[in-house]
Amino acid sequence: MNEELMNEEPMNEELMNAEQQLLERRQWFVRLGRRLTLGAISILSVNLILRSFSSACVSPQSPCQSCGVFKHCGLSKAEESRRTDRTESKGRA
C-alpha cells in the first residue's frame, strides 16, 4: 500500500506542476491583453490630444469661400473675403 501512495505522489506533483504552468500561462495572456488594451487606449488618447492641438485641418479663411454663391453674393463678409483673395493673388504673382 505504501508503494501505491509513493507512485501516486509523483503523479500528483506532475499534475500540480502542469496546472500551475497552465495558470501561469493564462495569467501571462491576461496580462498581455490588459497591457495591449492599455497601450491602445494610450495611443488613441495621445492621437486625440495631438489632433486637438494641431492646426492640420485646412479650412477656408472665410466660410463664404466654400459657398456656392460666393462670387455673386452681396454680403459684406463675402465682399471682404473676395478683396483679401485678390490682394493675396496679386502678392503671389
Image: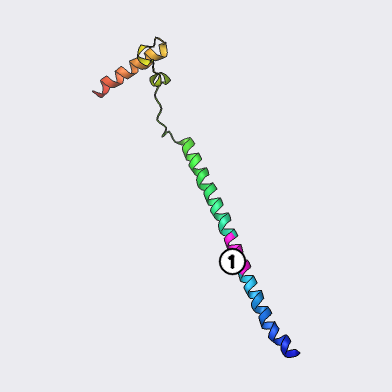
The question of residue 66 being in magenta is answered with no
> Residue shown at 60%/59% (left/top)?
30
- Residue at the spot 33% in from the left edge and 15% down from the top edge: 83
Q: Nearer the viewer, residue 68 or 65?
A: 68
Q: Could you tell me which quadrant the N terminus lies in? A: bottom right
Residue under pointer 1: 25
Q: Is residue 93 above or below residue 23?
A: above
Q: Counting other residues with Cα less than 10 Å from the Cα at mark 1, is it few (<14), some (14-19), or many (20 or more)? A: few
Q: Amino acid at mark 1?
A: Arg
Q: Quadrant of residue 70?
A: top left
Q: Is residue 35 left or right of residue 78?
A: right
Q: Nearer the viewer, residue 80 or 20?
A: 20
Q: Position of residue 73 (x, y in %)?
A: 39, 11
Where is residue 22, by image quadrant?
bottom right
Of all residues, the one furthest to the left in this rendering is 93
- For image coordinates 47% across by 37% down, the residue present is 51
Helix, strand or loop at label 1? It is helix
Considering the whole magenta stretch, tell me its main secondary structure.
Answer: helix
Magenta region: 22-29
- Work out whether 90 lies above or below 20: above
Look at 34% across and 16% down and name the residue there: 82
Query: Would you place residue 4 above or below residue 85 in this image?
Result: below
Task: Tell me the quarter of the picture where residue 26 sits.
Answer: bottom right
State the image coordinates of residue 44 (x, y, percent, origin top left). 51, 44
Percent position of residue 57, x then y: 42, 32
